[in-house]
Image (spheres, rainbow, N blue to C red):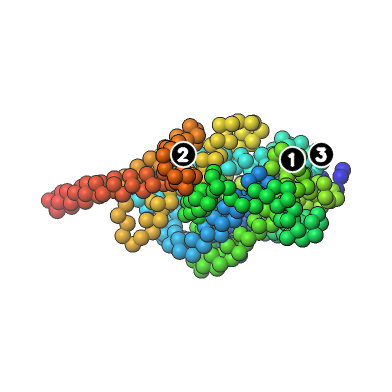
Amino acid sequence: MNPALIIICLFLVLSIVLGLLAKRGKEMGMEQWAVGGRGFGGIFVFLLLAGETYSVFTLLGTSGLAFNNGAAAFYLLAFTALGTITSYWILPPIWRYAKENNVVSQSQFFSKKYNSKGLGVFVAIVGVVALIPYITILFKSMGILVAATSYGAIPSTAAIWVGMIALLVYVMASGIHGSAWTSTVKDFLIFFVILFLGIYLPIHYHGSIGGLFHAVNEVKPHALTLPAKGLSVPWFISTVAISAFAYFMWPHNAPTIYASKNEKAFRLNAVLLPIYALMVLFVYFVGFTAIVELPGLEKGDFALLELSIKTFDPWFVGIIGATGLLATLVPGSMMLMSAATMITTNVIEPLKSDISDKSKAFTAKGFVVLLSIICAFFSMSDSNTLATLYLTSFSLITQMAPSLYLSLRKKNNITKYGSGMGMFVGVAIVVYVTFTKTTMAMLFPTLPSAIQDLNIGIVALAANIVIMFTVSFFTKKTLVSDKKDGDNLTSAAS
């Protein structure tokens, strides 16, 4: 057995043990399992929010972005830093409302805020549809990384199934507690690996980080600037703006927010998370190093793997593989739990209003198993439809942002009909433009390139907002009229 395989197996066992130990002394009802009894301190909240930011996809995908697209990849760093700053204002009121109303899922938040079971179901469907491709990509990335770093000793398919089973063991037993405990090891590992690779590789091959960029400029000078067209400055700004606006709309962020024992944790995290986001820079350095050192590489997502195997001994490659494994388990577990919780609270519970807390937890665990198996099977396929759907995930969850932001106002003038119709139109546009590959240039062929290069998600978001306000304006009058009629009937009956 090679050293890499031993290290990967040891960390796999450690993750299971930590996950199981997290259950000690706790009765796993729905609230305890899904949101930790709302008793997490600032450290666990930080680790989980940070853990959801840095996944195995960060290791492979981010370095691949730098390798393939050069400077355009910096949009990820920009929107992560800006997006995390929004937590200072929006997370405390979200947490307060969730605690006061016993909310345990994102879709339930919408359902109670707008007093609409139908809206809760729609948000749950959109959330699950957006998460399944994300979880699938995590599983697929984990399989690729573990197979490569174990030097083929663990096939990709086996890595996916073993990782999925490990995830299920501690999620079923400990819920969010298992994810929080595992994230302590995972965040330490990923922090160390990213910093080390990002600093060591440029120095090892080029003497310094500055030397790396001089080498990239000689080999591929256009990689260090944004192009005049396509992934240009207007594209960069619009993509960063939309992504930062919707940063906390991912359904798997909700359980971490609700799990906090107080709102002070969010103020501290708003300071720490943007600083933590700077780690993405060091992943870019790996991708840029690969541009020079791996000129024949065809798939950018393999940049970090190929460069690591070329540079390091097997034992250190094993640490990278173990990091990728844990970087799948923590965000993957949160995504699965949030998807299962949304289905349980907004689909199953309304159909069976007398369901007990323990039964809800049992039902949610059942959906975790089902969704895990579905995502595992998808991750072993080369479905182009799934890849296309993954690209729409962020645009889909962005459509929830306007309604959520406005619901935090003391006087919200948006009705449930306006919220639902706005989101529906936005989602419909996202799906249409993605699958038809429509671009801003196709919609507005006569406008300047600065407009044509804008992220087309702006069209969906703008349509969402216009429809939301328009429908709310007309339905608000109807709702007020219905309320008056109801009050008159009540007075007459008295």
In the picture shown, does residue 383 fall above or below 64? above
Q: Quadrant of the N terminus?
A: top right
**Disc nearest the viewer among 2 and 3:** 2
Mark 2: give few (<14), some (14-19) or many (20+) Cα within 10 Å.
Answer: some
Residue visible at 78% across and 52% down in the picture: 319
**Disc nearest the viewer among 2 and 1:** 2
Q: Name the disc covering residue 441, or none.
A: 2
Please tell me which residue lies in front, 411 or 180.
411
- In the displayed structure image, the side of residue 152 where residue 70 appears, left or right: left
Q: Where is residue 20 drawn, in percent x and y?
A: 67, 52
Specify the amino acid type for callout 1: Leu
Residue visible at 60% across and 42% down in the picture: 135
Label count reads 3
Residue visible at 81% across and 54% down in the picture: 205
- In the displayed structure image, the side of residue 481 where residue 425 appears, left or right: right
Q: Quadrant of residue 374?
A: top right
Q: Where is residue 139 drawn, in percent x and y?
A: 65, 41
Mark 3: give few (<14), some (14-19) or many (20+) Cα within 10 Å.
Answer: some
What kind of element bears circle 2?
helix
Q: Quadrant of residue 443?
A: top left
List the residue tagged with mark 3: 153
List the residue tagged with mark 1: 297
**Disc nearest the viewer among 1 and 3:** 1
Specify the amino acid type for callout 2: Ala
| 3D distance between C-alphas at marks 2 and 3 | 48 Å
Specify the amino acid type for callout 3: Ala
Please tell me which residue lies in front, 475 or 185.
475
